[in-house]
Amino acid sequence: MHIALYKPDIPQNTAAIIRLGACLNLKIHIIEPCGFNLHDSRFKRVVMDYLGMSRIFRYEDYDDFLKKNKDKRIVLMTTKAKKHYHKFKFKKNDMMLFGRESAGVPESLHKTIKNRIKVPMNRKTRSLNVAMSVAIISAEALRQNNLLK
């Protein structure tokens, strides 16, 4: 399964997601530009030695990402979605796209991505930490496809 991060801007979150990817055998796709340097000490401290165990793909922008992943269904994780993640049928080759911590994804992407889902939350709250969202969604997608080992 695939996790795509759209222009991530918090190094600790990206490092935690890469570490999760190594532990759960997920491919991590980073759509640049990032809001930090991937060689940042805070990033390296959280990712630890999991960087070498991870499969990471980097793209210079969203168009490059789309061009190289035409064979995958993109599923956008967004608080603006109506459908809950546990009511969605994940496929083994899905590309689960998560937006920037500070701004999500642009409205233009919302309009072009058919599959949009969310984690249900307390109405008084704004959003979950992106690394937590990745963990929740990934666990369900892996469970549905019998990929948890």
Image (cartoon, rainbow, N blue to C red):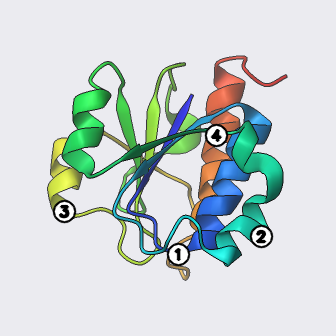
Residue 140 found in image quarter: top right
Residue where numbered disc 1 is placed: 123
Residue where numbered disc 2 is placed: 45
Q: Marks 2 and 4, Cα distance to the nearest angstrom?
A: 23 Å
Q: Residue at x 35, y 61 (%)?
A: 80
Measuring from the top left, give residue 142's x and y in whole percent: 67, 28
Label 4 element class:
helix
The kind of residue tagged 1 is Arg
| Residue 113 appears in view | no
The kind of residue tagged 3 is Glu
Describe residue 19's horizontal placement relative to residue 138 as left or right: right
Describe residue 19's horizontal placement relative to residue 89 as left or right: right
Q: Are marks 3 and 4 in contact (CB under 8 Å)?
A: no
Q: Marks 3 and 2, Cα distance to the nearest angstrom?
A: 33 Å
Work out whether mark 2 precedes mark 4 in sequence or the reverse, and give the earlier one.
2
Residue 83 found in image quarter: top left
Q: Is residue 35 above or below residue 89?
A: below
Q: Marks 2 and 1, Cα distance to the nearest angstrom?
A: 34 Å
Measuring from the top left, give residue 66's x and y in whole percent: 25, 36
Work out whether mark 3 precedes mark 4 in sequence or the reverse, and give the earlier one.
3
Question: Comparing marks 2 and 4, which lies closer to the viewer?
Answer: 2
Label 2 element class:
helix
Question: Comparing marks 4 and 1, which lies closer to the viewer?
Answer: 4
| Residue 69 appears in view | yes
Work out whether mark 2 precedes mark 1 in sequence or the reverse, and give the earlier one.
2
The kind of residue tagged 4 is Ser
Q: Quadrant of the C terminus?
A: top right
> Could you classify mark 4 by the number of other residues whose Cα lies within 10 Å: few (under 14), some (14-19), or many (20 or more)?
many
Label drawn at residue 138: 4
Residue where numbered disc 3 is placed: 107
